[in-house]
Image (tube, grey):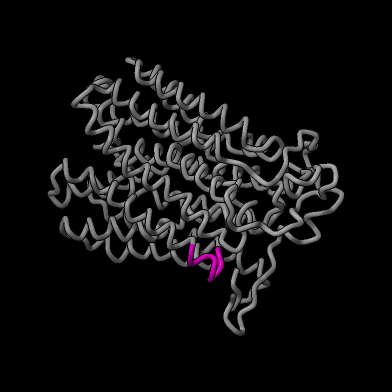
């Protein structure tokens, strides 16, 4: 409960405006009610915040995020001009050694770009048909993409298999993973999302280490297949456990007005812009911390590779912590505060770091504070959106941020080159953008609460 004198703004997704006849996104309440009897845009009974089906849905979401964002973390970790990630290091050094690093770097860049770009489509499919067939199709496409990558030997083959096919499968999986929890959890929503997104952190710890250890022993093809089999097993578990309380509604109309409505929502667009700016800033330390530690601080390359795993380990605890705090202090208050703190750490700790110990300390603390970036972004959207549009709106947010993900590495590399190999400029760029992005999200919160500061929101 909020403290005395602190007032909580009602969720916008419970307002009568979400229930107008113009809302063409039909939504039911629970699976025990017939869709025809359910009003549009709102669940009429409270979320259970627990129970077998709710916790199974959380388990499914955790598995899906392990297999999607966890794979993205392992694919782009350490991605810079000199070290290009767990997969890309092998491509650059062995399989694609004839290609420039900047050319090989298009593989992870396109993997993130297409995974985000297609989110509005997968989000809309989720809103209409639910998660079942979407997650099943995504499972097949993602695993096939990874298996095809394992037998690829040419640049264009890897680009198509990993950069495009795998990313399309991931898009179909992680949009439902981030949307379905909202129907099961309300008072414990932040904690639920924190626990679910810890799966991507754990994936970011396990998968890079697994690949690095397997490649020398069994070769790259079987290392990739081992990851594919692990992901297949977890996604099959997700297919069996993931569900939503919103019944499928294939009759829901799709109109231009419905698709454009989010762009007319000032609060939502501020969240989108803030997240876009945050994306530009948050990936720079993740992508460059290992190569910078080796080049500037004399950290051994084999030890530097564990910096991102350390960062993901810190993020695992940070996401659960941020989710729990959000249930008490408000999701917007928590997201803006913790994300800004991550930016401050870049400026106050990462820039003056002069030793391996300082860099490892920053890695843990940055991972912990930046955990809110992933853990709470979906609850930000759900808080101010009709439940029946949550998939489309979450997908739209990630789609807009795909352009940030595509250019963040080239921008960081260009700054390092302009500073003649000094990473200080890149760090200033990263920390500043994170603080600015958090501030933009906080402006959305101020508008939603009518510019009141002492509000749990």
**Residue 106 drawn above or below residue 34:** above
The residue drawn where x is 37% and y is 58% is: 317
Q: Position of residue 313 (x, y in %)?
A: 32, 52
Q: Position of residue 205 (x, y in %)?
A: 32, 44
Q: Quadrant of residue 226?
A: top left
Relative side of 216 to 287, left or right = left
**Residue 191 drawn above or below residue 221:** below
Residue 223 appearing in the image: yes
**Residue 81 drawn above or below residue 100:** below
Start and end of the magenta stretch? 324-332
Q: Quadrant of residue 15?
A: bottom right
The residue drawn where x is 28% and y is 35% is: 210
Q: Quadrant of residue 127?
A: top right
Q: Residue furthest bottom?
A: 5
- Give the camera-side residue of 373 and 430: 373
Relative side of 198 to 38, left or right = left
Q: Position of residue 113 (x, y in %)?
A: 48, 35
Q: Quadrant of the N terminus?
A: bottom right
Q: Residue furthest front?
A: 52
Q: Main secondary structure of the magenta part?
A: helix
The residue drawn where x is 51% and y is 28% is: 139
Residue 155 within the magenta-colored segment of the rendering: no
């Amino acid at each position: 409960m909020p403290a005395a004198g602190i007032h909580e703004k009602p969720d916008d997704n419970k307002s009568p405006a979400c229930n107008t006849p113009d809302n063409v996104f039909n939504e039911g309440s629970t699976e025990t009610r017939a869709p025809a009897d359910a009003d549009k845009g709102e669940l009429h009974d409270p979320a259970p915040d627990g129970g077998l089906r709710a916790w199974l849905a959380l388990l499914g979401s955790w598995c899906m995020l392990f297999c999607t964002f966890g794979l993205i973390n392992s694919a782009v970790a350490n991605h810079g001009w000199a070290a290009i990630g767990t997969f890309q290091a092998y491509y650059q050094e062995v399989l694609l050694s004839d290609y420039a690093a900047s050319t090989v770097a298009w593989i992870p860049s396109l993997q993130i770009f297409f995974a985000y770009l297609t989110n509005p489509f997968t989000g809309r499919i989720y809103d209409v048909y639910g998660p079942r067939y979407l997650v099943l199709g995504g499972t097949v496409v993602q695993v096939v993409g990874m298996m095809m990558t394992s037998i690829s030997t040419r640049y264009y083959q890897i680009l198509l298999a990993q950069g495009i096919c795998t990313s399309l499968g991931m898009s179909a999986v992680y949009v439902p993973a981030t949307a379905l929890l909202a129907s099961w959890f309300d008072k414990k929503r932040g904690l639920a999302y924190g626990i679910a997104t810890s799966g991507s952190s754990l994936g970011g710890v396990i998968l890079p280490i697994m690949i690095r250890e397997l490649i020398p022993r069994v070769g790259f093809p079987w290392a990739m297949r081992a990851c594919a089999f692990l992901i297949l097993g977890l996604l099959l578990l997700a297919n069996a456990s993931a569900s939503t309380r919103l019944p499928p509604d294939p009759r829901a109309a799709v109109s231009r007005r419905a698709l454009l409505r989010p762009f007319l929502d000032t609060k939502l667009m501020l969240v989108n812009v803030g997240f876009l700016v945050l994306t530009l800033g948050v990936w720079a330390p993740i992508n460059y911390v290992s190569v910078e530690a080796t080049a500037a601080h004399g950290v051994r390359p084999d030890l530097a590779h564990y910096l991102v795993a350390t960062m993901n380990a810190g993020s695992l605890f940070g996401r659960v912590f941020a989710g729990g705090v959000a249930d008490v202090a408000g999701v917007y208050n928590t997201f803006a505060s913790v994300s800004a703190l991550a930016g401050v750490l870049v400026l106050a700790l990462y820039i003056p770091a002069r030793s391996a110990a300082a860099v490892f300390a920053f890695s843990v603390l940055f991972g912990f504070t930046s955990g809110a970036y992933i853990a709470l972004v979906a609850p930000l959207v759900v808080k101010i959106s009709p439940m029946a549009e949550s998939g489309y709106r979450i997908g739209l947010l990630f789609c807009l941020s795909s352009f940030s993900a595509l250019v963040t590495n080239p921008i960081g590399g260009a700054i390092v080159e302009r500073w003649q190999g000094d990473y200080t400029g890149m760090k200033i760029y990263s920390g500043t953008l994170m603080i600015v992005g958090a501030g933009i999200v906080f402006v959305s919160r101020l508008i939603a609460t009518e510019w009141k500061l002492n509000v749990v929101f």
